[in-house]
Image (spheres, grey):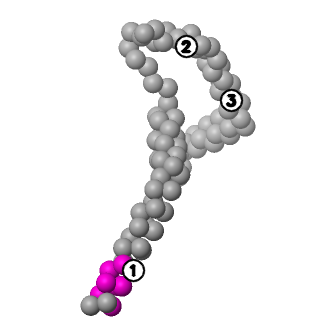
Amino acid sequence: MRARAQSSLEYTVIIVCVVAALIAMRVYIKGGIQGRLKQAADDLGQQYEMGKTTSTMALESSSHVITDVTTETTSSNTLLTITNTQIDYETERRYGGESITP
């Protein structure tokens, strides 16, 4: 009988320790979940509510692209087109502002 009581007490102590550890980690778990949700929302891009968002955004983009197209006739009278594209750089800049009315 005494061994059963000791065993029950040991299980209770273990369960209390696990619950206490989970409660202590709650802040960190919550922060991690919030961080993942924010990252997912940022990956979606800019969100607008129709009729309540006023935006004056400008977009500048520039690139340096060289495209070389060669067309040849093969021995079987088939046209062969070869396209070679070289992209040195691409840049994109967004600037402006947004306002949301209540």
Q: Bounds of the magenta span?
A: 3-9
Upstream in the sequence, badge 2 or badge 1? 1
Gap between marks 2 and 1 measured at Cα: 60 Å
User: The C terminus appears in which quarter of the rendering?
Assistant: top left
Which residue is the site of mark 1?
Answer: 10
Q: Quick one: 23 or 62, which is closer to the camera?
A: 23
User: The N terminus appears in which quarter of the rendering?
Assistant: bottom left
- In the rendered view, tell whether residue 73 sits above or below residue 16: above
Could you tell me which residue is drawn at 47 percent across and 35 percent down? 41
Q: Is residue 9 left or right of residue 72?
A: left
Q: Quadrant of residue 10?
A: bottom left
**What amino acid is at disc 1?**
Glu
Which residue is the site of mark 3?
Answer: 91
Q: Quick one: 92 or 98, which is closer to the camera?
A: 98
Q: Quick one: 67 or 92, which is closer to the camera?
A: 92
Task: Tell me the number on the disc at residue 98.
Answer: 2
Could you tell me which residue is drawn at 46 percent across and 8 percent down? 101
Q: Is residue 66 left or right of residue 74?
A: right
